[in-house]
Image (cartoon, rainbow, N blue to C red):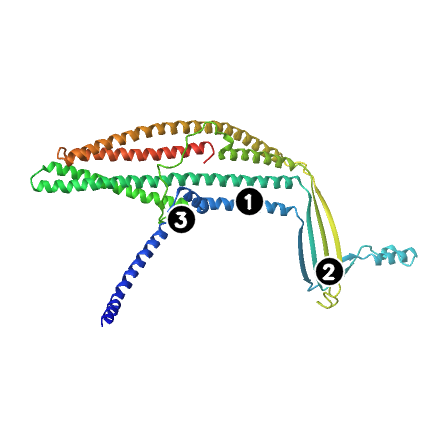
Amino acid sequence: MEKQQTKYSLNKRLPLFKIIFTLIYILLSLHNNNAQNKPFLSLEQAVDLALEHNNEIKNKRLDIEAQKYAVKSIIAAGLPQINASSSLTHNVEIPSAVFPDFITPSIYNVLIDEGLLSNSQFKPGAGGQAVQFGAPSQIVGTINLNQLVFDGRYFLGLKAAKEVVQMTKLLAIQTELEVKEQTMKNYFRVLLLEKNLTLLKKSKNLVSNLYDQTSAMYVEGMTEKLDVDRLLLSKNNIENQIRTITAERIVARMYLNLILGQKIDEKYELTSSMENTGFTSPASNLFDQKDRIERKILDQSILLNEMEIKGLKVTRYPSIYLNAQHLQNSFANNKPFEGLGKDWFPGSLYTLSLNVPLFDGFNKRNDIQKLKIKSEQLDNQQQYLENSLNMQYESAIMELTTQRESLVFLESTVNLTKKIFETERTKFEEGLGSSFELVNAQNEFVSASIQLSNGQYNFITKYIDYKKSIGKL
C-alpha cells in the first residue's frame, strides 16, 4: 500500500517537473536568442565588418573589376577581328546596261571603203545595244579578318589602362581608410554616450532617493519646501540630460550600423573599452609622406597625365592595318532559284592600309598644351600637398600631446570631486550635512566624470588622426 502511495505521489509530481524543465528550456532559449540577436562586437571585429560589407567599399572594388575588363577590351582590340556575313539577292528584274553600237559602224566603213555606199548614207554613233548582266538569284558568304599591325596609340593605351587600374585600386584603399576611420571614431562615440548615460542614471537614482526622503520629511514638517524644490530641479535636469543622450546614442548606433553595412536597427554588444585601447605613444621617426594615400594618388595622377601627353604625341606616327577577305558565290540559272547553292565560286583578297597623319589643324598640339598646363597644376598641388601633410603630422602630434596632458588634469579633477562627494555623503548620513550640499557634490563629480569620458574620447580621436597623418591607420 505504501509503495502504491509513493508511486502515486511521484506520478502526481511528474507534471511539475515537466513544467520546471519546460520553463528552464524556454529561459535558455530566450537567452540564446538574445545572444544571437545581440552579438558581441569588438573594435577589430567592427573594422573587419565594415571593410567587408560597407557599400562604398563594395562599389570601389567593383570599379577595380570594371577597369580590369576595360584593359581586357583594349587587349582584345589588338587581336584579330573576324566576322562572317551572308546575303541572298533575288533580281526580280535583272538590270540592263546600254553599250554603244560598235558593230554597225565597222560594217558600214568597209562598205564605204569599197565604194558600195557613200558617206552621206551613214551617220556614225547612232543607236546602242541594251545588255543584261547578272543572275536571277545570288548567295554570297563572306569571312572578313581585320588585324592591327602597328599603331603606337594601342600599345601606349594598353599601358595607360593598366595604370588606370592601379589608380582605381588606390582610390579603393583611400575609401577603405576613410571607412576604417569613421568606424573607429563612431564605435568609441557610442561607448562614450553609453558611459555618460550610465553615470547620469546613477546620479538620477541618488537624487530620486533624496527627493523621496526629503518630500517625506517635508510632509512631516522636518524640512523646508525650498529643499524639495531644489532636489526636484536637479532631478528634472538629470532626466532631461538622459533623454538627450539617449537620443544621441540611438542615432550614433544607427550611423555605426550604416558604416558597417548592416541594417540600422541591428543590435550589437560593444566589448571594447575606452580605457584599454592599446594606443601607444607617438614615435617621431615614423613619418614618411610616401606612406600617405593622398600622396600616392597624386603621384599616380601625374603619371597618367604624362602618359596622356605621350599618347597624343604617338598619334603623329603612321599606323598599319591588315584586312583579309574570303567569299563564296553561288548563282541561279535561268529560273529565279534554279541551281542556287549547287555550284560555288570562291574569291580571296587582302589589303594592307597605311595611314600617315599629315596635318590636323594644330588640334593635337593644342591638346598637348592643355595637358602641359595640367602638369603645372599637378606640380602646384604636389607642393601644396607636401606642406599640408607636414602640417597635419605636426598638428596631430601637438594635439595628441596636449590631450594627453589634459587627461592627467581631468583624472585629478575626478579624484578630487569624488573625495568631496564621499565626504558630503558621510556628513549627510551622520546628519551633519544637507541634501543640497550632497547633490551639488554629486553633480560636480558626475560632471567631472563626463568631462573625463569626453577627454578620453578626444584623446582616442586625436590618436586616430595621428595614425592617419603618418599613413599607418
Instruction: Decide: is 328 above or below 425.
Output: below
Q: Secondary structure at mark 3?
A: loop
Q: Secondary structure at mark 1?
A: helix
Q: Quadrant of residue 136?
A: bottom right
Farthest residue, direction left: 221
Residue 95: where, in percent of width, then height? Answer: 71, 60
Instruction: Decide: is 349 above or below 301.
Output: below
Q: Nearer the viewer, residue 64 or 196?
A: 196
**Label whose residue precedes the other's in the sequence (2 or 3):** 3
Task: Give the foreground label among 1 and 2.
Answer: 1
**Label whose residue precedes the other's in the sequence (3 or 1):** 1
Q: Nearer the viewer, residue 21 or 109?
A: 21
Label 3 and label 1: CA atoms lie apart by 28 Å
Q: Identity of the amino acid at label 3?
A: Gln
Q: Kindly identify which residue carries mark 3.
A: 262
Label 1 and label 2: CA atoms lie apart by 44 Å
Label 2 and label 3: CA atoms lie apart by 65 Å
> Where's the N terminus, which quadrant?
bottom left
Q: Quadrant of residue 160?
A: top right
Residue 363: where, in percent of width, then height? Answer: 61, 35
Residue 248: where, in percent of width, then height? Answer: 31, 42
Q: Are marks 1 and 2 in contact (CB under 8 Å)?
A: no
Residue 336: where, in percent of width, then height? Answer: 71, 67
Q: Identity of the amino acid at label 2?
A: Asn
Q: Kindly identify which residue carries mark 1.
A: 67
**Which residue occupies 70% across, 62% down?**
139
> Where's the C terminus, which quadrant?
top left
Q: Identity of the amino acid at label 1?
A: Gln
Callout 1: 10 Å neighbours few (<14), some, many (20+)? many
**Which residue occupies 27% across, 31% down?**
415
